[in-house]
Amino acid sequence: MNYQLPKLSYKYSDLEPFFDTKTMEIHHTKHHQNYINATNLILEKNNIKNIKINELLLKLDNLSISSKQKKLLRNNAGGHANHSFFWKILKKDTKPNKIILNILKDNFSNLENFKKIFEKKALNFFGSGWIWLVKKNNLLKIITTKNQDNPIMNQINNKSLEYPIIGLDLWEHAYYLKYQNQRFLYLKSFWHVLNWDKVLSLFLK
């Protein structure tokens, strides 16, 4: 089984003016596709077949491959998983409903405080990586991962998993065409294209 570039449920232009068309197109068809191509090549060379992407991430450290191949697979399979997740949580002009607002209230006092903490942590993150809102045992917390690491990597059993329900790409390729070095503007724009309906379904799943 080869991984393939997922089709989006919206056009690249649908997230304008917050996420620009050109960045979305390059991000999806170039950056994400490159992660997929590299992942498929590594799996083919090591005769690894018929494994879903999240299962691959969970088993990554136990694979019988060289440390160099493992590192390459971590970066590229992680890139595929992270971006596949990212595209699914984007939709313009949705609003958090009462369930989400109460969940955020229980964990972060209120929606605005959650956004403030999320933005501050993202701004203070050095280099390339991701910021996540993860769920573990019905509790939420904000974490960051470096490069293309994913929250479920290196977790031994499902009971310990930190499931992502929000994830934002902090690599410059995600925002530099429009926002240049102004990551804070990119973070502010994210709230306008975050699909809160999907966030709720991921929390309840």
Image (spheres, rainbow, N blue to C red):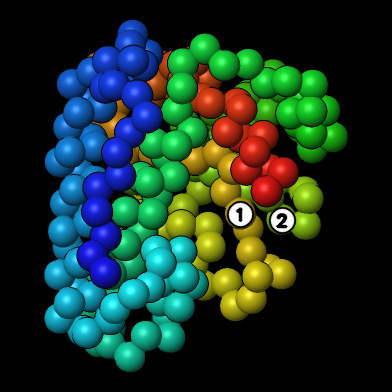
Q: Quadrant of the N terminus?
A: bottom left
**Label 1 belongs to which residue?**
163
Can residue 49 be seen here? The reply is: yes
Whole-number angstrom distance, CA of label 2 to CA of label 1: 7 Å
The image quarter in which residue 17 lies: top left
Label 1's element? Answer: strand
The image quarter in which residue 186 lies: top left
Q: Nearer the viewer, residue 50 or 150?
A: 50
Side of 54 where 173 appears, left or right: left
Q: Amino acid at mark 2?
A: Lys
Q: Going 62% across and 43% down the picture, which residue do you hit?
A: 202
Rendering coords of residue 27 (x, y %): 23, 35
Rendering coords of residue 126 (x, y %): 39, 43
Of callouts 2 and 1, the N-terminal one = 2
Q: Are marks 2 and 1 in contact (CB under 8 Å)?
A: yes
Q: Going 77% across and 57% down the picture, which residue do you hit?
A: 137
